[in-house]
Image (cartoon, helix red, strand yellow):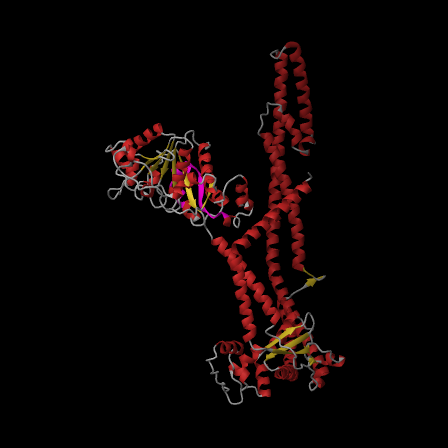
Amino acid sequence: MSGQGQFDQKEDGGIGELIKFGITFLRRQYLMIAVTAALSTAASLLYLRLAPPTYSAQVQVLLGNTRAQFVQQQSLLTEPAFDVSQIETQLQLLKSRATAAAVIEQLKLANDPELNEAEPSLLSLWQRLRPSVTSRPKDRQPELQGQPSEAVIDSFLDRLSANRIGYSNIIEINFNSSDPGRAADIVNAVAKAYVADQLDAKFDANRKATSWLQERLRDLGEQALTAQRAVDAYKAQNNIVSSDGKSIGDQQITELNARLAAARAQNSEARAKLTRYENLLGTDPAKSTLIVGLDAIGPDATTSSIITALRQQYLELSRREAELSARVGRDHLAVVNVRNRKHEFSNSIFEEVKRLAGISRSEFELATQRQQEIEKQLAQAVSQSRSTNSAELTIKDLESRAKGLRNLYDTFLQRYVGSSQQETFPITETRVVFPASPPQTKSKPKTKLVLAFGILGGLALGVALAFVRDVMDRVFRTSSQIEAALEIPCLSLVPLLRTPTGSTGRPSRAEDDPKQRTLSTVPAIHRAVVGMPLSRFAEAIRSIKLAIDHNPAKISNQVIGITSALPNEGKTTIAASLAQLIAQSGKRAIIVDCDLRNPSLTASLAPKALAGLIEVASGNRSLEEAIWRDPQTNLSFLPVVRKGPLIHTSEILCAETISRLFDRLRASYDYVVVDLPPLSPLVDVRATAPLVDCFVLVVEWGRTKIDVVQHALHTAPTIHESLVGTVLNKTDIKAMARYDANRSDYYDDSHYIRYGLSGS
């Protein structure tokens, strides 16, 4: 199969899993979703029935009306194009309190009952729900004579809205009222008031601009003249001279920088040459390294006629020494004489090198002195240039200010001369595009929208509540939950038995005769595995036994401890049923009641027992005298007899006598099933860890909290290590299909009926 095909299969599998999860989620929570949706729909219908209708009238206003060309040229004020911020500003002006007050005063709405009614929709709805409430708020009078109150203005603004239409310069104004005609009149009045306010603002702005411009022209003329005089005076005071547009100080700094770079290069070269001489002088004159190192000094040594002649003679003597040494030996007198003469030439070369080194040192000192002088001159030039530059900056600033004032004066003068005649000709940029007319249909409440919101919102709210309820359901529902939360395999799903728990047979007797100690009053729920061998319950108990027999953790699983995290999870029933199943199969089995503080198994199987586990362990009775037997399955039972309050039960279970007793049980029986107390309330189970080979944890379906079981196992690590697995008890098999989408077919009773089993 190709990679793309595998990817498609995985994707399809993921979608299928998601669909299964959604179906099982709806099957679990459909009732809550349906009830929530129904309540939301009913609330929507009630709102539509009781909410008063509201009519909305609209009027459109255009911003940025085209002006005459000559008016744009002669206008005193700038005419920028409308942008988003300016349109938002106009919207706020439309919805301002000043506009509202002007319209209220124009239409005499200060005493209007609709505007004086606080939150009319809610109040009307409340009056409809409570017919007994007949009083309505008194009309509030204006706070000042002739002026609307703040409450009336707030109510007016709540009904007024203005919005931009798309990306255009058209604004749509809306006003809501219970009377369509009144809504149209008010919204038209708002548009007219806004246009009139824009016209008045333009006229007032032009008048103020002309008056301000006259005063500003006088001030600008005086300021420009004063600034030019300040420039001339500052130049004369600081004696600022420049050449070719560049100051003399800058030219001097440039030249000094060039000279300093050349001096530094010369100094570095002299330093390097002196270093080479000093390194050569540090060698031994008698060795040949002196002659070899002459080439590394530079042209001074290689072009020196003295060094060249001495070097040639030295090399000639070296050649003769080598030839004589080869013929007569190194210690011959002729060889020694030649070697001594060679040393004399080597010393002469060394002295000549010392002389050249002295000359090089003098050159280095001279170069250093020249560099220092140039650096000093450069520092003085820079210092002088800074003061000159500061003055030049001041000159530039003064010139710029003078020029700006002169340009500003010229501009203001031209605008004033050309626009003084236009003061009485202001024109607004806004106009009404289309006046409002009385609306024919109500704007709210919108029936379809409210119903759709009610139904869809109810469904969404129901799904959300159902999801929260599903998430908060922190109990064990499936075997995968157990394996994921506890990291322990789930051995079996034991269904909830509907069989009555009454006793069968004649009453039990507690005589000392062993033949008389028979279990004749076993509850029907403990007999279910024997009485209904083809039931789902019996098959689940067989699954527990099979898991115990094939547990790879321990070689011996002879002693089996049955416990739970909390009481009443059905551990005693599981223990008794498992023991009955093992005994019926022909194995020697005994069930031991180790719940010393609440021996419920003893109370149901042998309530009249006179001796039990404690008496046998203490030596007061023999094991044979305390054991009860079931004649139907040949199951043995060791009860617990409480003759008084037992406080230190964990110490009793840790005693050596109990350990020896369990050793005897191991030797006498194939299986020892131990009914233990729960983990969380008591520590007794931890005390039985050395006695028990493996443990089985019983968890009640749909009741036991996940956190409780995790905490119980965390506090008992020795028990956790010996756990074979868990048993999900009292399982509602029919409800399991709603929680386990992947294995919903597993819980179908038809699979069991096909093999002769019953679903119960």
Residue 515 vs residue 347, the one in the foreground: 515
Residue 170 vs residue 313, the one in the foreground: 170
Image quarter for residue 586?
Answer: top left
> Can you say which quadrant of the picture contains the N terminus?
top right
Question: As displayed, is residue 110 above or below residue 751?
Answer: below
Q: Give the x, y percent position of residue 192.
A: 65, 83
- In the picture, measured across the screen, residue 192 lies left or right of residue 488, that is right
x 53%, y 42%: residue: 753
Query: Residue furthest toward the front?
Result: 506
Q: Give the x, y percent position of residue 273.
A: 63, 36
Highlighted magenta segment, given as a residue range = 711-733
Q: Give the x, y percent position of residue 103.
A: 60, 84
- Total labels: the figure holds 0
Query: Residue furthest toward the right?
Result: 69
Image quarter for residue 538?
Answer: top left
- In the picture, measured across the screen, residue 363 lies left or right of residue 580, that is right
Q: Is residue 212 visible?
A: no
Residue 497 vs residue 547, the one in the foreground: 497
- In the picture, measured across the screen, residue 66 lies left or right of residue 448, that is right
Query: Residue furthest toward the bottom?
Result: 145
Q: Is residue 734 visible?
A: yes
* Residue 414 falls within the magenta-colored stretch: no
Q: Give the x, y percent position of residue 262.
A: 66, 46
